[in-house]
Amino acid sequence: DAKTTQPNSMESNEEEPVHLPCNHSTISGTDYIHWYRQLPSQGPEYVIHGLTSNVNNRMASLAIAEDRKSSTLILHRATLRDAAVYYCILKNAGNMLTFGGGTRLMVKP
Amino acid sequence: DTGVSQDPRHKITKRGQNVTFRCDPISEHNRLYWYRQTLGQGPEFLTYFQNEAQLEKSRLLSDRFSAERPKGSFSTLEIQRTEQGDSAMYLCASSSTGTRGGGQYFGPGTRLTVT
């Protein structure tokens, strides 16, 4: 499985934008880039996914580098409820998700 | 609520006992997945079904673990002769084949404690 690299932790101030980076230099042409987050004591929550183009939804935006070797999850205005572990995952035709360590996002009021 | 549900939410059992967990996926989803998560780690894939067919089970942790989805709707995960190392959160997720590359939707999990 192609792997992703994320910082262990990041801090943000409430109501400010947050950019969560992910490196995936061995990504293949058929890998989708998925982001999930997991709040304390809850199951993971699907956030967004993309293949080549940038994507927006009600939760976040996903910016994908032109060479696809990195991507950034953008939370436009962090709230205290966004404090969670964020996982960047490459998913291909196989159906399993391979979770790494993720980035623990702390949001300060 | 139309999300993925799991039952029970918590289970405490003694070593050597058998346990069974249930997962009800989102109704229109034909794929169902089981994951295990230990403290401080990301979820680890165990197995998945498309409709009633179990298409991947090589990641089940041992032959003590088995899963079924008899009518292509709900699924059960059974652990026989539980061991203390089985203590973990067991997560179920579902997805649709209709959305290429689409997301999986997780339930709240069943926390198992083996004493």
Image (cartoon, rainbow, N blue to C red):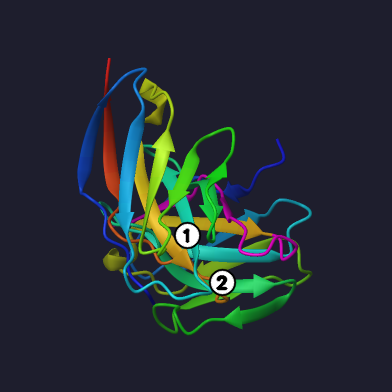
Q: Which residue is mark 1?
A: A33
Q: Secondary structure at mark 2?
A: loop
Whether residue B88 is in magenta: the answer is no
Compared with B30, A82 (above or below) is: above
- Tell whether A17 sits left or right of A53: left
- Tell whether B103 sits left or right of A36: right
Compared with A13, B8 (above or below) is: below
Whether residue B113 is in magenta: the answer is yes
Q: Secondary structure at mark 1?
A: strand
In this rendering, which labeled residue sits more in front, label 1 or label 2?
1
Which residue range is magenta in the image?
B96-115
Q: Which residue is mark 2?
A: A95
Compared with B103, A39 (above or below) is: above
Q: Position of residue B11 (x, y in %)?
A: 44, 51
Q: Position of residue A26 (x, y in %)?
A: 34, 74
**Mark 2 belongs to chain:** A
Q: At 31% across and 48% down in the image, what residue appears?
A: A21
Residue B75 falls in which quadrant of the image? bottom right
